[in-house]
Every structure is written in C-alpha cells, then in structure tokens.
Amino acid sequence: MSPLDSNKQVPNLRGEDGEGSVQVQMDPKVKIEGAKVFAVYGKGGIGKSTTSSNLSVAFSKLGKKVLQIGCDPKHDSTFTLTGRLVPTVIDILKEVDFHAEELRPDDFVYEGFNGVKCVEAGGPPAGTGCGGYVVGQTVKLLKQNHMLEETDVVIFDVLGDVVCGGFAAPLQHADRAIIVTANDFDSIYAMNRIIAAVQAKSKNYNVRLAGCIANRSKDTDEVDRYCKEVGFKRVAHLPDLDAIRKSRLKKKTLFEMDDNEEIQLVQKEYLRLAQLLWDGTDPLAPQPLEDRDIFELLGFD
C-alpha cells in the first residue's frame, strides 16, 4: 500500500465540511499562523499563475516576506519567479520514501525573484491519489521546518478544478480567496461556481472572498454587471497586453521586463492590489446565480 493510500485523510461524504463537500478530511491542527494567507482561484488557463507570481513580487516590493505555493500537478506556478520548473514536494518525498523527517527546507523551498520563497506541491499521478493530501503535506512540512514563522504573506496558486481536493485544501488555511476572471461568459460562469464552492467552505473555515481580478481584459463591463447582480466586487483590472504573454515566454515576472509606460501601469496596479489586500478587505458574501440565470444575465440577444 502506497503512502498516498494509507494516510488517514479520507473522503468526507457526510457534508460536515461545508454543504455538499466531497473532499479529503484535512488535519485541523495543521494551520498557518502569523501570516496573511491568500488563495488565488479561477478557471484553467485564465492566468492564475501569472497573477499569483506578480502579486507575490508586489508584496515583496512592499517589504513583505512572501511564500508562494503552487497547488497544481503541472507545477508551473513559480517558474517565472525562479526561471525554471522546480522539483515538487511530492517528488522530493518519493525520493526519501516519504520519510519527511529526512528533508531540509533547501530540498523543497526555492528562492525566486526579489526574495520570494517558492514551493511547488505537485500532485499524485492521475487517478492514484488526491491533490488535497499533497497540499496538506506541503503545509505540514513547512511548519515542521519553521518556514512559516517569519513569513508575512502566503499565496496559494490553486488549480482550476472546482470539485478536486486540491482545490479545497487551501481554503482551510486562507484568510481571503481571490478569483481571477476575464470579461467573457466562460470565465464568469466558472467564477460563479467557485464562489459557490468557497461559500460552502466558509461555513466551517475562516476563509472569505476578497473579490475578483479582471485579467487579460480590455473592458470589464460583463464582470462588473455580474458583480453588481450577485454582490461581489472587482478589486483589480489587468489589461490584455502582449508584454504579459512575453513575460511567461521569457520566464520572468512583469517586474523584470523592460520598462515602458504599459508595463509600469500594470506594475502599479499589482502594487496597488497588494497594498489593498495587505490593509485588509471586507469579507464578501455574494449570492451565486443558478446556471440558467447566468445565461440570461450575460451576453447579447
């Protein structure tokens, strides 16, 4: 029996962990204390990793000690910070036959641009285990190695699958959840489902919604219309710039790109957002729409 099969975190089918929850049971004793914790959500391919990495740098530019945790098996959350794909926690654990006591911080924590600490949780092979277990083990390792004691900000960059344990696990630790969207139907439709999932978890956890970021969007009219309808809030707007695409290809954050007026404006928006989140946002409790109601609300006849 593999360590992923023998752990005591079992699927919760009874709904105690938020109504309708079918996730791994996380260890309630493993908590992140002392840091402000943000979980970044959004549909697959919307730009969560780009947003998370640039937001991490923005926090670091404000003088904060930042840790970014990638929660996707693709383990590409932090490569613009480090310039490479770093080994994952699950890969490192396999190398020591899951004897976590043999690991040191240098084995799984890597320093990125401007001092941002980077961790990639990784994930089990498809169909063999739960991503929620891996996120839980990552936080446990960080605590055991005292990596959270001098950290000001923790950012979880979360995979896009709403029904996955890897999606839910960061909500146990986060103070605020942020949703990355775009000014289109599919992104807003996914945001609506994410809101419902976070709201379910907030019945048992301290996590609350901070708002949404309109990413890669010239306009924000559809996002704003949805937010007004459900009682949500747009906290930032990042335009659809080719420089952002190029930054990923160059394996760099926007704070390392050649300066021009457009790049400077985006950097300022990230710095403004980081300051807003650090100062604290009101806990939002939007009322997600039924699927048919989103069809009625968005788009054109």
Image (tube, rainbow, N blue to C red):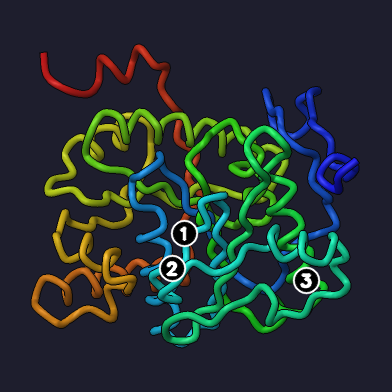
User: Callout 3: 10 Å neighbours few (<14), some, many (20+)?
Assistant: some
Q: Secondary structure at mark 1?
A: loop
> Is the N terminus in the top left, top right, bottom left or bottom right quadrant?
top right
Image-based side of 69 in relation to 134, left or right: left
Callout count? 3
Relative to the observer, which residue lies in front, 69 or 102? Answer: 102
Relative to the observer, which residue lies in front, 8 or 239? Answer: 8
Question: How many angstroms separate mark 2 from mark 3 (CA)?
Answer: 23 Å
> Is the C terminus in the top left, top right, bottom left or bottom right quadrant?
top left
The image position of residue 75, as x and y in percent, is 52, 57
Q: With respect to residue 223, does 135 lie above or below?
A: below
**Comes first in the chain, label 1 or label 3:** 1
Q: Secondary structure at mark 3?
A: helix
Q: Amino acid at mark 1?
A: Asp
Residue 2 position by quadrant:
top right
Numbered circle sitting on residue 58:
none
**Comes first in the chain, label 2 or label 3:** 2
The image position of residue 158, as x and y in percent, is 52, 50
Q: Are marks 1 and 3 in contact (CB under 8 Å)?
A: no
Residue bearing the label numbered 1: 76
Residue bearing the label numbered 3: 143
